[in-house]
Image (cartoon, rainbow, N blue to C red):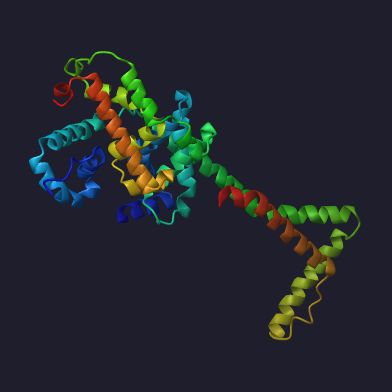
Amino acid sequence: MAKLKHLTDYQIQELLSEENRLRKTFYDEHLSSCSSCQEKLTEYKKLFSKIEYADDIEISPDFTKNVLLRAKALKSTETNYQILVSLLPFVLGLSTFAVLELLSVISLSTVVQSSGSFISNFISTVSTNLFSWLPSLNVSFELVAIGVLTASLYHLLDLLLIKPRFR
Amino acid sequence: MTENKNLIDRVLSGEKIAFAELIEQYKKLVFHIVFRIVKDIEEREDICQDVFIKVYQGLKGFKGDCKLSSWIGKIAYNTSLNHIGKRHDDLWEDMGSREGFLESINGNGHQPDHFATQRNYGEILRAEISQLPEQQKIIVSLYHFDDLSYKEISDITGLPDGTVKSYLFRARQALKERLEKKYKSEEWLN
């Protein structure tokens, strides 16, 4: 191994790398008898030890504070959106009612009436007969339609606006 | 990783001071990456802020399949590339070659300066590093200033380990040659 030709710059740098300590023993024999390679190794050692002095990054003292302020503002926007999202089904439901009422598809009084009878029917049938209550329910077509419409709109909005932004 | 796991859990639970700790721990890394890629001095710090906001928003999705430093570094790297409007490949292709760098050393023809008269090693090396091709500057700074491993640098830049190693070796060889050309060896070695 002592007769090995001179180590390349690459090999000498490898010797100095923390990750390649194993190779050190492989080249040690040559290094111990070659002054030229020893000199090169010393030069690289010196360079390695001095490079860190070249770190020139200056970070403003307010940097962390500024990021925290931005994160706080972002969180408050996110909270506002969450409130909006939780109110959305009600708003959409009411708007749908209003539109349907306007188009004379349904009347609000009918819906209120059928909602009332639905709830009272539901409670009484469930309390009297737990397993055969479903067929006896008097669910109005309008209520089902409004429910489906509201759920679809909400899902669409969530998919297009809310999900990409916050999840 | 356990330390980072605790830190991540604390940030996710909304602990403000934990996020401040995370910023303190990784801001140097983020600055090194952003400052090497983005040239616009006015915008650099804003981009570093953007990086930490992205970290804040995306931390929930961090799976721990790489080190947190690599994950944050990758966000900084991609954000910087997006900002300058370059793709990863463009950055590594159009930023000069070592041959050009060495030509500039050989071609300037001036006599060796006195290294010892310039007290600040940092200043001298900074000047020499600034002459390196961009990709080598990034890798030198990640390896020597941030103490990242080849693997971590590879995770951040998306380059294979071998390429990272090769850029790093070439950068250091070029630095050494440049210092030897400009200064008497006994001076820069002292």
Q: Nearer the viewer, residue B69 or A124?
A: B69
x, y percent for residue A165: 59, 47
Which residue shows up at 44% across the image and 39% down it? B76
Q: On the image, which quarter does residue A130 sit in?
A: bottom right
x, y percent for residue A30: 12, 44
x, y percent for residue A77: 56, 42
In the visual, does A73 lie left or right of B131? right
Residue B158, compared with residue A109, is above or below; it is above
Which residue shows up at 15% across the image and 21% down it? B187
Q: Nearer the viewer, residue A87 or B20?
A: B20
**Residue A64 seen by the camera:** no
Q: Nearer the viewer, residue A75 or B51?
A: B51
x, y percent for residue A40: 17, 34
Q: On the image, which quarter does residue B119 sit in?
A: top left
Q: On the image, which quarter does residue B143 sit in?
A: top left
Which residue shows up at 28% across the image and 33% down it? B172
Q: Nearer the viewer, residue B113 or B108?
A: B108
In the visual, does A74 lie left or right of B130? right
Residue sticking out furthest to the top: B110
Q: How many marks?
A: 0
**Residue B133 seen by the camera:** yes
Residue sticking out furthest to the left: A33
Residue B181, compared with residue A119, is above or below; it is above
